[in-house]
Image (cartoon, rainbow, N blue to C red):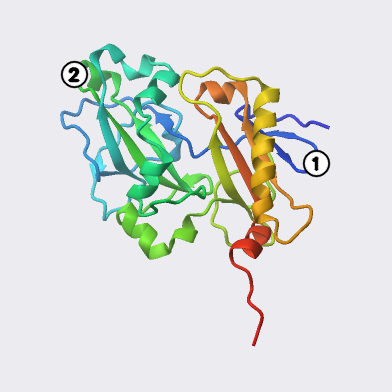
Amino acid sequence: MRHKSHNYWSRARIAGAAPLTIGLLAPAVLAIGLAAPAQAATPAIGECYNYPITVRDEVSSAAGAVSCTSAHTAETYWTGSLKPTFGPPSKATPGARLAATTACNTETLNAYVAMPGRTLPSRWLSFAIFPTDTQWSAGERWVRCDAVFKTGLKLTNLTSKAADFVVATGIDYSNFCTPSQPNGRNTESYPCTDPKKNWIMVAARDLGGPGTKFPGTSNVEKRTRAICSKIAKRYNGASKFPSWWAIWPTDRGWKEGRREAQCLVPLAQYNKEVAPVLPAG
């Protein structure tokens, strides 16, 4: 039986169970937009900003730079420039904005926040910020990508640099878990603190780059399930038939830049493989 949801970004299925239509914002680059007065200064790497998660589906942010030792939710880890032919970012297609920020990838983000070489998905996300129409008209041609840390339904308020926060809390604190078995309401990123309930994301694989056409629901489902079933075997918790969950993009999500295959397994199952309990004595 297939249950429908009002979120059209992605679909998910647990191994051995019926598919569900659910939404999960992948750790892919998200674009942002709010009206703002022109700012003459070009953003710099290492500057911090304070804005809510509600700006994630827009193009630009009105928030100005703040001290990284005061409360903030974002830190710039990459900056670039736009050609005059790009035009006002508010009128650009999602594909054009994604193409302009291809340097804002997971590898670059992880290296900036003191997690070089990390392959496990995390709660660190990338937000792409473009000039507002006013700034564009004033001649500003910059684009920047900010590192943000998600807890539940909100961005986490930090009072230190991102890399310092990771060093202080430990890399495992950045792991991405759902509060319980994934479904239409349990897809947000939470700390992995409850092995009895949490499911951890163990893989996120891009299925297509900017400008690529949606391959069709059956194709993305088939590709995602193939990826997740194979990866889940690494985290089977010594079980012959491990549980796993697959999330794949819909047509709408694909057009908006959400093109990842995402795989989750129970946290208890994961822990048995990565942190086995040693026998006493």
Is residue 75 visible to us here? yes
Residue 125 in percent (x, y) is at: 44, 42
User: Could you tell me which residue is drawn at 35 percent across and 49 percent down?
Assistant: 111
Question: On the image, which quarter does residue 259 sit in?
Answer: top right
Which one is earlier in the sequence, the residue at label 1 or at label 2? 1
Q: In the image, is 85 to the left or to the right of 268?
A: left
The answer to whether 48 is drawn above or below residue 82 in the figure is below
Question: On the image, which quarter does residue 266 sit in?
Answer: bottom right
Per the image, the residue denoted by label 1 is: 17
The answer to whether 153 is drawn above or below residue 255 in the figure is below
For residue 143, the mark is: none
Callout 2 amino acid: Ala
Determine crowd level at label 1: few under 14, some 14-19, many 20+ residues with C-alpha closer than 10 A.
few
Question: On the image, which quarter does residue 79 sit in?
Answer: top left
Per the image, the residue denoted by label 2 is: 138
Q: In the image, is 166 to the left or to the right of 11?
A: left
Label 2 sits on a secondary structure element that is loop
Residue 232 in percent (x, y) is at: 67, 49
Could you tell me how many numbered marks the image carries? 2
Q: Nearer the viewer, mark 1 or mark 2?
A: 1
User: Could you tell me which residue is drawn at 26 percent across and 21 percent down?
Assistant: 82
Callout 1 amino acid: Ala
Determine crowd level at label 2: few under 14, some 14-19, many 20+ residues with C-alpha closer than 10 A.
some
Residue 37 in percent (x, y) is at: 23, 26
State the quadrant of the N terminus: top right
State the quadrant of the C terminus: bottom right
Residue 207 in percent (x, y) is at: 56, 29
